Amino acid sequence: MHAVAQGGRGKKAPSDHPHARQNALKSRANEQTVPQTPRTRRARPRFVALVGEHHAVTDPAAQADFLEEPRGLYHGRTPVVLRPGSVDEVAAILALAGELGVPVVLQGGNTGLVGGQIPFSGEILLSLTRLDRIREIDPASNTMTCEAGVVLQTAAAGVDRLFPLSLGAEGSCTIGGNLSTNAGGTAALAYGVARDLVLGLEVVLPDGRVWHGLNKLKKDNTGYELKHLFMGAEGTLGVITAAVLKLFPAPKSIETAVVAVASPEAAPALLGLMQDRAGDNLTSFELMARICVDFALRHGTGLRDPLAAPHLWYVLIELSSGVRRGLRDLMEETLALGLERGLVADAAMAESLEHRAAFWRLRELVAEAQKFEGGSIKQDVSVPVAAVPDFIRAATVAALRVVPGCRPVPFGHLGDGNIHFNVSQPVGADKAAYLARWDDMSDAVFAEVLARGGSISAEHGIGVMKRDYLPRVKDPVALDLMRMLKTALDPKGILNPGKVV
Ligand code: FAD
Ligand code: ZN
């Protein structure tokens, strides 16, 4: 038995991909970007002068952590990692890059899962982690103004209100990266995705100009909503240097339950019941197939089966409230009603903070535990909530057709219709041979997603990993608009070349 690091939050998972897959992805990433090394290398001293020698990383050993992402799937190269300490320095770097036509790749916490933060063709790497000030907390307006490099967990801990974005990588990922990838996570059901949590932005444009959009206004109808251009753009349109984030009252009571549902169809039905009864108090509704629990128990330490007997499907439900009383009764009554209606097979409610943490650890360890089961082909897809059971069933059949004996490990944010349809290799299979089927498996799973009006990326974005899929799945007019925006904002193709579009 292998022990998985406890508290998956912020931990980096080592690679589970063979070099074959890695090289294929790398060469595909490189194909469409022009190698820039000679020109960039000549310009290096001018860039270094903008941040000072001390904040320019040129030593290959010191660069290593910037050039490889969490799973070791993508590797990059760069003549220099620039670590600016102010917005003015970022602006000066982009102005010079624009003048010289030197491309720049942006990086926050380097936890992104689609290769967006990696310089594949010798671009300059701009690391934003030194922009790490919380500029202001305004309790009266319920806002916090954070620079891009503030680590998510630090931002969330820095206030006595709630900043509700919550992801497995929160100990390392940054606000800039979260907004650029429009991250989702486990509380999106109640609070929305990253873009819903932002009132204002400060952005450095590819020509070095600064857009000062740090307002605290909920209502502002003075033209196009520009901030939404930069969120979810994965660093292709501008550098987010700071954001005004929304804060919420800190919850006074939280109730968490692990519930066995009678069938996959029962899960969305129970979600509907919970929404009817608990309304805004429903913060998380996470689905796990039994195999997820098996993997977490097998490879994690200090965990136990949450219910007396094993069941095929589970949901982890969390309610939270700004008032102290009544939440436990609400959870109990709704689960009892679910039992009565044949939706709930069994349930356990957390009796203490430790108990609650153990429930969440079970959920958060799933992806990490998978790496001890051999190769895994991972997807972060979404379909309409009501279509989730049918999607899982059809995608399972499709996956088994591609690789007989493979083991689908579906879990995720059912409340958002967002399923991590990860597929582990057959027991005892050759890992490299299995992972070589990545694209076939993706095609099969995506076909079921698209047949239900879904999205091939609900959370992690496009980066380089799914760039070549985009023209196949995106409305051509939408894709055309995206390209027009890219050309309008970044006519010289300076920012994150070869990513997304
Ligand atoms: P990076 O990885 O450094 O960059 C990501 C992208 O943003 C790149 O394209 C980069 O160029 C761009 N970028 C970075 N900073 C800026 C900036 N200041 N301005 C403009 N562009 C910028 N995602 C989810 O949505 N939900 C999850 O539940 C979730 N769980 C995760 C769990 C683990 C263990 C890991 C490793 C990742 C997870 N992710 C999840 C992926 C998620 O996209 C990232 O963790 C996070 O949002 C990226 O932040 P980062 O600071 O690490 O950005
Ligand atoms: Zn997720």
Image: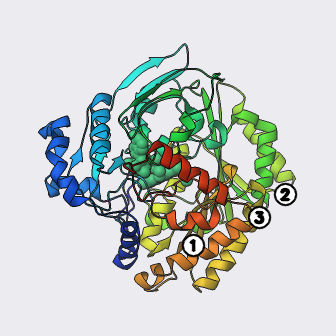
Of 63 and 331, which appears nearest the observer? 63
**Marks 2 & 1, CB-CB < 8 Å contact:** no
The amino acid beneath tag 1 is: Ser
Image disc number at residue 342: 2
**Marks 1 & 3, CB-CB < 8 Å contact:** no
Of 206 and 317, which appears nearest the observer? 206
**Marks 2 & 3, CB-CB < 8 Å contact:** no
Image disc number at residue 263: 3
The quarter of the displayed image where residue 60 is located: bottom left
The quarter of the displayed image where residue 154 is located: top left
Q: Secondary structure at mark 2?
A: loop
Residue at the spot of label 1: 442
Q: Secondary structure at mark 3?
A: loop
Of 4 and 464, which appears nearest the observer? 464
Image disc number at residue 112: none
In this rendering, position of residue 151 left or right of residue 184: left
Dot 2 or dot 1, earlier in sequence: 2
In this rendering, position of residue 223 left or right of residue 92: right
Q: Position of residue 19 (x, y in %)?
A: 34, 76
The amino acid beneath tag 2 is: Gly
Of 478 and 9, which appears nearest the observer? 478
